[in-house]
Amino acid sequence: MIFGHWACASIANRTYWKEESYGFLLVASFLPDFLDKTANVLFCMPGRGFGHSLVVFAAATIAGWIFLPRFGIGRSSLIPAAILWTTHLVGDIVTWNVLFWPFLGPLEPTDRFGFLWSFYRMYVQFNNPPMLAMDLLCIAVAVWLWLTQTDRPKIPVPVTVRDFEKPSR
């Protein structure tokens, strides 16, 4: 759900959490993949592994409660982050043995993550139709919100040549 996770962050930013940093919401939406894909590439761990488990979700939430204020981010930001992490797990259709790792046994080894190969399997081969359907639904909602909302940020356009001049001192 490469585009679906992006769409979930976009939906969150256009609806309930308009004041929240879009970058923060985007990171929260992709955090399980940031953890697992990095561990997969560096240490040959499963590409959908511990970062997609509830144990790591709980640990990240506790760490966020402790450390976010030190970075100037309010603890209230944990709510959208936790919801986006949860939508990530639902969108990826995480299996029970991954979701409840390590309680249901070890994770199965997988091949190294390849972005282009994963992209091809998802969007060209339609390797996982239910996941693709959720991905496309999230994208459609994000695009619909973007097109229908009138409070989109406006790009400032200079009106006169004076707008380009340096201010006099």
Image: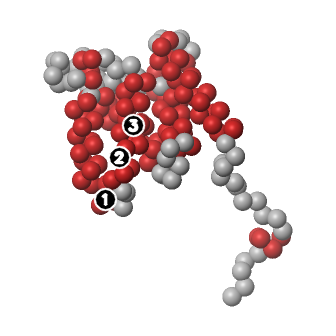
**Does 18 appear above or below 70?**
above
Q: Who is closer to the viewer here, 139 or 78?
A: 78
- Write down the residue under mark 3: 83
- Which sits earlier in the primary sequence, circle 3 or circle 2? 2
Which residue is nearer to you in this view: 3 or 130? 130
Expressed as whole percent of the image width and height from the top left, the position of residue 81 reads 38, 42
Q: Residue 51's x, y, as percent?
A: 29, 32
Instruction: Sort mark 2 into few (<14), some (14-19) or many (20+) by Cα contacts within 10 Å.
Output: some
Q: Report, in whole angstroms, how far the alpha carbon at label 2 lies from the one at label 1.
A: 11 Å
**Residue in the image at 39% along x and 19% along y:** 93
Name which residue lies at 50% across and 44% down.
16
Q: Around disc 1, counting alpha carbons within 10 Å, would you say few (fewer than 14), some (14 to 19), or many (20 or more)?
A: few
Question: Mark 3 or mark 1: which comes first in sequence?
Answer: 1
Q: Amino acid at mark 1?
A: Pro
Residue at x 44%, y 48% (from the top left corner):
24
Q: Position of residue 157 (x, y in %)?
A: 76, 59
Residue on which the image places disc 1: 69
Give residue 78's mark: 2
